[in-house]
Amino acid sequence: MDSKIISRILVFVVIGGLIVSPAAAADEIIVSAAASLTNVMTEIRRSFEAMHPDIHVLCNFASSGSLVQQMANGAPVDVFASASSHHMDRAEVQGLIDSRTRRIFAFNELAVIVPSRSGVSVNRVSDLCATNFKKIVLGHPDSVPAGRYAKIFLDAHGMWHTLYDRLVYTNSVRQVLDYIRRAEADAGFVYVTDAAIAENSVRIVLDANKSLNISYPIAVTRMTKHRRPAVAFCEYVTGFQGQAILLAYGFRSPE
């Protein structure tokens, strides 16, 4: 083949690559999701990418309060999935999300867990006052939804101040789970979906879901530069495929 023709082909390939690259980059989105969604959202991401090979999803997991703070500080986020409406409200008040895209996509339940090797039993909240429970872990109520729900639950039973000196705060619900898995605490407040992934290392001893409305909202952020794929991802989470995966991980679908 003539060397001039080869040179022209190479130039065309290089220029073509420069043209295609920005388009490919435009289809990469960042999803900031609550720590309790780590496993299920990772599975949803894989399933979504399989059906949308032109869209790449990066997941960022932390407590919902921390994620709101990250967005407020300018972190690039395209989709926000919170473990509570409270923190989604905070994001909305600060103008961080597009409220038109906000949807509830799942519900969860709160439980008290202990290490599987622990022989304690809990029939009522007041049983946590027993000397067996010297260290009770929960997410920080100001930034971790599970911790906030735990405080609401204990307050409702008049136990917050009673147990206050035994409470140890963590930065996420998954840290609570790790404490109990390693038997470094006597009891902890987590979601039932967290307890489910811990296999045989933890044991649920009390349903703490009384009157709690633990809902998970999702929304496209206002700062996104990739609205089309961000909207597509939200629709996937709230659609049939996403809901099927959530159910498989123990979450409840919106009515």
Image: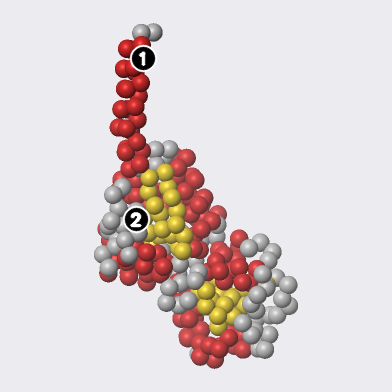
Badge 2: residue crowd in 10 Å (few <14, some 14–19, many ≥20): some
Q: Quadrant of the N terminus?
A: top left
One can see residue 254 in this view? no
User: Which residue is painted at 49% across and 71% down in the image?
Assistant: 171
Q: Helix, strand or loop at disc 2?
A: loop
The foreground one among 213 and 185 is: 185
Q: Position of residue 134 (x, y in %)?
A: 64, 85
Q: Position of residue 107 (x, y in %)?
A: 46, 64
Q: Helix, strand or loop at disc 1?
A: helix
The foreground one among 156 and 75 is: 75
Q: Position of residue 241 (x, y in %)?
A: 46, 47
User: Which residue is painted at 39% across and 42% down in the image?
Assistant: 55
Of all residues shown, which one is farthest toward the front?
Answer: 3
Q: Which mark is residue 6?
A: 1
Q: Report which quarter residue 105 is drawn in.
A: bottom left
Badge 1: residue crowd in 10 Å (few <14, some 14–19, many ≥20): few
Q: Report which quarter residue 254 is drawn in.
A: bottom left
| Total residue callouts | 2
- The residue wearing badge 2 is 76
The reply, left or right, for residue 123 in relation to residue 34 is right
The Cα atoms of the two marked residues, 2 and 1, are separated by 42 Å
